[in-house]
Image (spheres, rainbow, N blue to C red):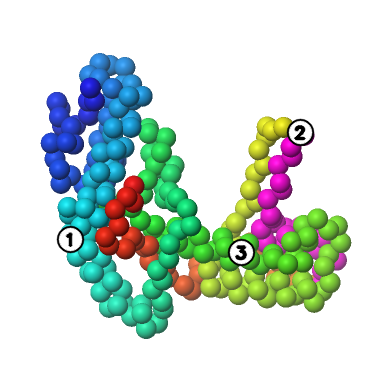
Amino acid sequence: MTWYTRPAGGGPQALPSLSPTLLYHKWHAYDSGNDRFDTKDSRLPFLEEVARLVNDLTGGGRAAIYRAWHDRYREALRGLRIESDGEILEAETVWRLVSGFATNPALESGLTLHPLYGFPYLPGSAVRGLVRHVAEMGLLTGKRESWAEREELPPEAERSELLDEAEQLQAILGSLSVEPLRLPEEGDPKKPVPRPPLPPRTILQGWRKKEKELTEKEASRVRDLLDLHTGGLVTFYDAVPSPGQPGLV
């Protein structure tokens, strides 16, 4: 039997229109009514109930509620002149996507749900971070991929080209912030882990260590890229699901 922290003696099955967000973040399920607070058996039914409520809202019996909200959201973006001064993009994920995975330590599986309606979404800050990560890693394509392995600096013209692109990215999206991925500490020595690509920030930090080999202007530009923390010029809004999609959770 599954017991919930609130309301006493009941569960979400008694409230078919309960917000998935309230259930997921404000309630908690336990295996029984004792004082052990075990969650092993109740965790899966609890998450299944959250998923049922989400999918009922977005593609099931209450889908009209979400569709009406989605229409209002698009209208609000038009009111902000997004479609004339910016762009509204529609995209599909190539595989499974979890937003906010680390937000619920009690369940060890977090999920970002809209605070009022409860549908899954990507906050604007997460969209910005995703775009910035792709943009930063895109600076090191082609022959630049090997720069981290070289002891000598690239030619001045190539350094200037990277600095130009990095400064443009910083102006549009904000400070360079992507840090290198950490390699696993444990592993089979006979099967080495591929080294992840290093981001521009790591390359520039290496250049700063060789500052005497840079021109005075280059050294100043490198310091600004690493030390100045600025916001970007582009505003990102929340990414929300298209209406009529069951099975989102």
Per the model, the C-alpha gap separating discs 3 and 1 is 40 Å
The answer to which of 156 and 46 lies nearer the viewer is 46
Q: What residue sits right under mark 1 in the picture?
A: 64
Please state if 49 lies on the left or on the right of 215 as rendered: left
Q: Is residue 195 left or right of residue 241?
A: right
The numbered mark, 3 or 2, whose residue comes first in the sequence reads 3
Disc 1 crowd rating (10 Å Cα; few below 14, some 14-19, many 20+) is some
Rendered location of residue 52, percent (x, y): 25, 44
Does residue 193 appear to the left or right of 10 in the view shown? right
Circle 3/circle 1 CB separation < 8 Å: no
- Per the rendered image, the range of residues in magenta is 190-215
Secondary structure beneath label 3: helix
Q: Nearer the viewer, residue 187 or 207?
A: 187
Disc 1 element: helix
Dot 2: what SS?
A: loop
Which of 45/172 is in front? Answer: 45
User: Tag 2 or tag 1, which sits nearer the N-term?
Assistant: 1
What percent of the width, then of the height, locates residue 26? 26, 39
Q: Does the segment drawn in magenta span residue 35? A: no
| 238 in relation to 16, above or below | below
Say few, some or many: other residues with alpha carbon within 10 Å of mark 2 (under 14 / 14 to 19 / 20 or more): few
Determine the residue positioned at 25% across, 16% down.
Answer: 34
| Amino acid residing under circle 3 | Glu
Q: Which residue is mark 3?
A: 136
For residue 1, the mark is none
